[in-house]
Amino acid sequence: MDILVAGGHGQVALRLLKLLADQGHTARGLIRTPSQAADLQAVGAVPVIGDLENDASLSPYVKGADAVVFAAGAGAGSGPERKRTVDLGGAVKLADAAVDQGVRRYVMVSSIGAHDPSSGAGSMGPYLAAKGEADAYVTSRADLDWTIVRPGHLTDEPGTGLVTVSREMGGRGPVPRDDVAAVLAACLTTPATIGQTFELFAGTTPIDEALRF
Ligand SMILES: NC(=O)c1ccc[n+]([C@@H]2O[C@H](COP(=O)([O-])OP(=O)(O)OC[C@H]3O[C@@H](n4cnc5c(N)ncnc54)[C@H](OP(=O)(O)O)[C@@H]3O)[C@@H](O)[C@H]2O)c1
């Protein structure tokens, strides 16, 4: 498969691109900073230069893909405005470009709490609102085969391949970025995940088994 990962230099995205490249896929990462290209090439990925906020359309980058993954984020240090332009606006632009290019498969890295933004204190409120609206936009598109993955608190602990997946919203807990990347990669080749929204935590169930909906 040819897979375009938006936010290609992100910590989850780089792990995902490496897994996909190792599996023999064409793993393309959308980055806005050309100097990050070498880091993508080092994991076997193909850098694609483009900006989620400043490019009017992402169609030229999505062209030729079999699937897209949204793994970008404005980051903890950003204000509410960039939550709108990246976490919401970037995800919406990616969905529009996918539809425009006839790419049905869309895997979204969302967040726990996106179902209830009012639960987020301080800057988490606008972040979760942006995530929730982005999820709603993607899931409203009948022309997309979507999966919404809502991880708990991301850690840099080594992955275990063991997770907890829950379709009941409102859970809490950590999850290694390694395992988030492994779940995203598995979603791309597991049709049963199409049309599913689930929370993801460190756990005790092998990933393949956890994704048997
Ligand atoms: N942290 C948590 O505990 C947590 C929990 C649940 C879900 N999440 C979500 O998980 C996802 C991945 O997290 P992560 O830790 O891997 O994130 P990360 O390392 O902060 O990566 C985010 C990436 O988005 C890119 N980006 C920002 N603005 C962009 C733009 N205009 N155009 C293109 N790329 C842009 C950044 O690139 P630059 O280097 O150019 O800025 C960066 O590489 C995010 O969506 C995050 O919201 C996080």
Image: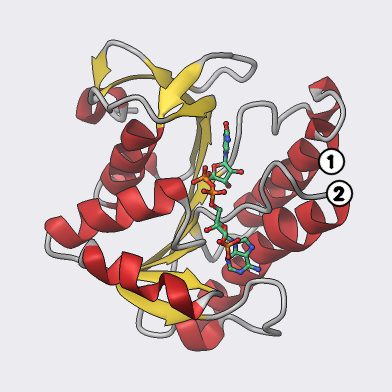
Q: Which residue is mark 2?
A: 80
Horizontal side, residue 77 vs residue 98: left or right: right
- Near mark 2 (Cα within 10 A), the count class, few <14, some 14-19 or many ≥20, is some
Q: Work out whether residue 157 can be spotted.
A: yes
Q: Quadrant of the N terminus?
A: bottom left
Q: Nearer the viewer, residue 156 or 152?
A: 156
Does label 1 or label 2 sit earlier along the sequence? 2
Q: Is residue 148 above or below residue 35?
A: above
Q: Looking at numbered disc 2 in the image, what kind of residue is underneath it?
A: Pro
> What percent of the width, then of the height, locates residue 106?
47, 58
Kindly identify the residue that appears in the image at 59 percent across and 67 percent down. Answer: 95
Pointer 1 residue: 126
> For residue 21, what is the image quadrant?
bottom left
Side (left or right) of 11 relative to 160: right
Q: Which element type, helix, strand or loop, lies under badge 2?
A: helix
Q: Residue at 41% of width from left, 53% of height from top?
A: 13
Contact check, label 1 and label 2, Cβ < 8 Å: yes
Q: What type is the residue that disc 1 sits on? A: Pro
Mark 1, residues whose alpha carbon is within 10 Å: few (<14), some, or many (≥20)? many
Mark 2 C-beta closer than 8 Å to ligand 1: no
Q: Quadrant of the C terminus?
A: top left
Where does the image place residue 110, in percent across and percent down from the top left? 58, 41
Taking the view exactly as shown, the residue that stands out farthest to the top is 204
Quarter of the rendering containing residue 96: bottom right
The answer for how far apart the CA atoms under marks 1 and 2 are is 6 Å
Furthest toward the bottom, the residue is 60
Where is residue 136? Give x, y as percent.
70, 47
* Residue 59 position within the rendered picture, expressed as x and y whole percent measured from the top left: 54, 84
Q: Secondary structure at mark 1?
A: helix
